[in-house]
Image (cartoon, helix red, strand yellow):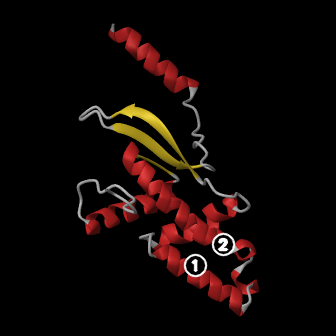
Amino acid sequence: MRHQNAGRKFSRNSAHRKAMFRNMVTSVIEHERITTTDPKAKEVRRLVERTITIALRLGDVLTKPRDQRSAAEQGKYVHALRMAGRMIRTREALHRLFDHVAPRLVGRPGGYTRILKVGTRPGDAAPMAILELVTYQLPTNAPATSEASGANATGADSAS
């Protein structure tokens, strides 16, 4: 029986599994969206939400500039940085969590991520999913100029 044995093992030893999850949590914070297998997304979601919750416990301290924080507030901030730093591997991602991600999620009572199923992987038919933050916005790239798209269409016609 598997009483109180939560979590999937993914055919990895504990050190490899922990490193893989830390890398994935860091990627979610950095890019706000990753594509992975569905079971991994479900496991990483737990860790991402816990890490975001660490930052959100600061509340008002997140919005204050550093020089306006009291000593006690700065101590709480540093403690939260260190606690989140146990899961996030890079300094840039850690500061991105506290400066960009957490302030957008303040006031939300949980559910900071979503999992979108995107079909199967071509090589082994593994079920794939996108794990993203609920505040993720698709990047709005400038559309191709009409001249460039017209040149491609013209070139394709002349090759025929």
Q: Secondary structure at mark 2?
A: loop
Which residue is located at x 51 percent, y 73 percent?
84
Locate the N terminus and report the quarter of the image it occupies.
Answer: bottom left
Answer above or below: position of 82 versus 152: below
> Would residue 37 be seen by someone viewing this image from the given angle?
no
**Residue at 38%, 50% in the rendered image:** 40
Tell me where residue 156 appears, x and y as whole percent. 39, 14
Q: Residue furthest bottom?
A: 71
As drawn, the label of residue 139 is: none
From the viewer's perspective, is 61 left or right of 96?
A: right
Quadrant into which the C terminus falls? top left
Residue 43 in the image: above or below residue 90: above
Amino acid carrying mark 1 in the image: Ala
Spot occupied by residue 45 in the image (x, y as percentages of width and height): 48, 54
Q: Residue at x 61, y 49 (%)?
A: 134
According to the picture, the residue beneath numbered tag 2 turns out to be 57
Element type at marker 1? helix
Q: Which mark is residue 80?
A: 1
Q: Is residue 90 visible from the viewing direction of this image?
A: yes
Using the image as rendered, state which of residue 22 and residue 66 is in the foreground: 22
Crowding around mark 2 (Cα neighbors within 10 Å: few <14, some 14 to 19, many 20+) is some
Q: Along the horizontal axis of the image, is 92 left or right of 136?
A: left
Q: Quadrant of residue 25?
A: bottom left
Nearer to me, 37 or 94: 37
Amino acid carrying mark 2 in the image:
Arg
In this picture, residue 152 sits left or right of residue 11:
right
| Mark before the other along the chain sequence, 1 or 2 | 2
